[in-house]
Amino acid sequence: MVGKSQNVGLNLDYMQQSAGFSLSHQWLTDFDPTSTRTNAYLIGILNTLRLIVVGIVLATLLGTIMGVARLSSNWLVSTIATVYIEVIRNTPLLIQLFFWYFAVFLKLPEILDGPSAFDTFFLSNRGFVLPSFTTGGLAWLFGLLLVAGAVAGLYVRHRQQKIEDATGIPSHQNLYGLATFLGIGLVAFVATGLPLGSDFADIVVSDTGVARYEGGLVVTPEFTAVMVALVLYTGSFIAEIVRGSIQALPKGQTEAAMAIGLSQYQRMTLVILPQALRTIIPPLTNQYLNLTKNSSLAVTVAYADLVFVGTLINNKAGQPVPMFLVILATYMAMNYTISVFMNYMNSRVQLVGR
Amino acid sequence: MADARPIDGRPFGKRARSWTHDNLFSSRFNSGLTVVTVAILGAGLFAATRFIVSSADWEVIEVNRRLITLGRLPAEDGWRMWPPLYFAAATAGWAFGMWGKLSRRDLVWLVAAMAFMFLVLVEGANALRFAGVPALFAGAYVATAYGLRDSRYDFIGRQVGIAAAVVVIPLAVITIGQFGGPPTRLWGGIMLNIMIASIAIVFSIPLGILLALGRAGSLKTVKYACIGFIEFVRAGPLIVWLFIGRFVAPDFLPESLSDIDLVLRAMLVFTLFTAAYIAEIVRGGLQSVPPGQVEAAKAVGLGSVATTVYIVLPQALRAVIPALVSQLISLWKDTTLVTVIGVFDGLRAAEATLTQPGFTDNASEVFLFMALAFWVGSFSMSRLSMRLERNIGIGER
C-alpha cells in the first residue's frame, strides 16, 4: 500500500531534479538519467504526439476504406468489412494490444535471425529498422525554412487555383505548389551547408555475443503494437460513422452521379464522400479524442508515453497530486487543440456548396 | 430483411449463378476485387486454420479455467457463483418470454453462447450444475411466453420481470460478498470484470441522470458544479483516473478509509467515470424533449419533480437507449484496464498463466481466448440493444 506522501502541495520544483531513470531511445530525442524530469516529461509528450498524429491519419484512412467497403456491391468485400468491424469494435482494446505485442511482435525472430533487405531494412523482435538521417550544423534553420517553403507552396497552389476558378483554364496548381516547395527546400539545403547526412542501420555484435542495432530509425515493437491496435480499433468505429453518413445521403445523389457518367471511384470521391463529410466530422472528432485518450494504454507495454513517464517520475518523487494534475492538464490541452481544429474543419465543410 | 425477399422459383444452379454474378462479378472492377480478396482471404484463412487445428495448444486454457474465471477466489466459495447465475438465467428467460420473441437466429446465438460457457466453465461435477442455467432460462421462457403473457396475469408477470431485473445485480453482490463470503480483494478473474461492470452500471446510471438534471437545471451553483465534474472527468483517460485512484486517493480519503482495497477503489473510479459520460448522453436526451411537453405538464398542474419524473425523463431516456447501451459496452470492455493497477481481473489472470512453466509460448492462444470471451459479452449486448430499439420503435416516429 502506498503511504501518505509528505507533501500534497502543488510545488513543481521537483521537476527540475535529474530524472534518475533511463528511457529507451526514440527517434530524434536524446535522454539520459541525468537529464531533468521536465525533459523526461517533454519526451513523454512527444512520444504520445507521435502515436496520436500517425494514429489519426492511419485510422481515418482505414476507417474510410472499411466504411465504403461495407457498402460495396461486392458481397465478399462487404462481408469482410462487416466481420472486421463487428469483431474489432466489440473486443477490448487492451486485449488486442496485448495480442499484438506479446503474441505477434515479440514473437518475431531474434536480431541475427530476422529478415533484412539491402542491409538497411531489418525486422526482428527488437523492432523494424529503416534508414534515417543525422542532423548537424544549421539543421534547425533548414527545418524552419522547410516549413516556410511549405507555406509558400500552399500559397502558390491557392493562387493558381483562384486563377483556374476565374478563367477556367487549367493552371496546374498542384505542380506549381510542389515546385515552389521543392525549389525553396533545395536552395535552403545548400544555403544552410548540407546539414543532413544519411544514417544507415547496422547490426553490431558485442564481445559477449549480444546483438543490437546501431544507427538508423528503429521503430520499436512497443510503438508498432500500440499503433496497430489503436488504428485497427479506432478504424472500426470510424468505419461505422462513414457508413452511417453515406447511407444518410439521399439516393438521388448516387443516381445523378451515375447519370452523368461518373465512374464508381469518381462517384465516391467527388460526390458522395464530400457531402457525407458534413455529418461525419462531429462524431469523427469524438473518435479522435478517444484515440488520444486510448493512446495512454501504451503504458501497459512500457512505451514511454506521457502517462508512463509521469508514473515513473511519481515513483521517484512520491508527489502524486501535482504530477497527475499536470498529466490531466496535458490531455486537456491536447483534447482542446483537436476540438478547435475539428470545429474549424467542420465550419469549412458546412459552408461548401450552400 | 431476408424474410421479405420474394421466393425465387428457379432451379438452384440458375439461382446460384445469378447470385454469384450479381454479388461477386457484376462489373470488371468487382471481378478484380473478388479475385484479389479471395487470394488474400485464402492465405489468411489457411494460416488461421493451420494455427487453430495444428499449432495451437489449448491446454493452457483448460488447465487454468478456474484461474481465468474466478481468479484466486477460495475454493470453498465457488458455490456462490451459481445462485446469481441461476437467477440471472431465469430473469433473462422471463424477460424474453414476457416482452420479446425468440427467433431462430436468437436461438442459434443462445445455444452457441451456452456451448462456449460450457466449454470454459465446466469441469467434472460442475456439468450438472451448469445444466441448470439453460434449464432455468428455458423454463422461465416457456412459462411466460406460453402461459403468463397476454393472460389475465400479464400485468403481474411484467411487474415481476422488472422487479427481478432490478434485483439481479444487488443479489449477486450479496450472495458473493456477504454471509461469510470472501472480501473483495480476493475477487478475481472474469467474474471480477462482470462485478465491476455490474456495480458501475447500477450506480452510474442514477448518478449520471442526476448530473444531467443538475446541469440542465436552474440552480447556478449546482449547475456549475455538475459541469465542472463532468468536463474534468471526461478530460482524462480512464487509465489516468485509475492511477489517481491508486496513488492519489489515499492522500485525500480520511485515515479510516485510506486503505480500502484496490478493488473497491477501482469500482468507485469506474462508477464516477461512467457517470460523467452517461450524464452527457442523458443531457442530449433531455434536449430532445420538446418544451411543449413541460408546458403541458405545468398546465395540467404537475409540480416540477413530477414533471421531471413522469414526463421528461421517460421520453429523454427512451431517446438515448442506443447511446446508453454503447456506453455500457465500452464500460464492459474497459474493465480490463484494472489490470494496470494490479487488480487480479480476467486479463491479469490470463497474463499470469503465461508465466507458468510450459505455457510461456502460448500468448496467442491466451489472448485470442480472452478476446473471444469479452467479444461474446459485447456482441450479445449490442444485438440485444438493436432488438430493444426495434421493439420500442426508436426512430420510427
Image (cartoon, helix red, strand yellow):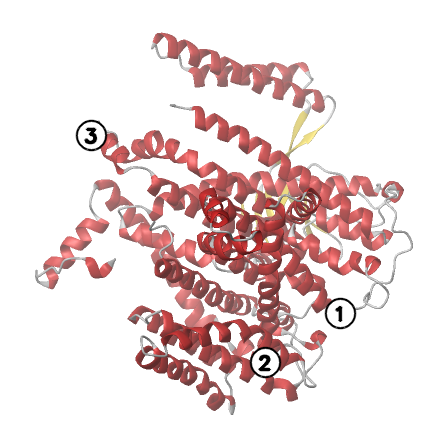
Which of the chains bears the disc numbered 1?
A: B
Q: What residue does disc 1 label?
A: B261
Q: The residue tagged with tag 1: helix, strand or loop?
A: loop
Residue under the point 36% across and 54% down: A80
C-beta proximity under 8 Å, tags 1 and 2 = no
In this view, the residue in front, A131 or B321, is B321
Mark 3 to mark 2 CA distance (whole Å): 63 Å
Q: What residue does disc 2 label?
A: B66
Sequence-wise, the earlier of marks 1 and 2 is 2
Q: Which mark is residue A259?
A: 3
Label 1: few (<14), some (14–19) or many (≥20) C-alpha neighbours in 10 Å = some
> Which kind of residue does numbered mark 2 sit on?
Arg
Image location of residue B51, percent across then percent down:
44, 67
Name the mark nearer the viewer: 1 or 2: 1
Which of the chains bears the disc numbered 2?
A: B
Residue under the point 81% across and 67% down: B257
Name the mark nearer the viewer: 3 or 2: 3
Label 2: few (<14), some (14–19) or many (≥20) C-alpha neighbours in 10 Å = many
**For residue A161, above or below residue A66:** above
Label 3: few (<14), some (14–19) or many (≥20) C-alpha neighbours in 10 Å = few
In this view, the residue in front, A123 or B128, is B128
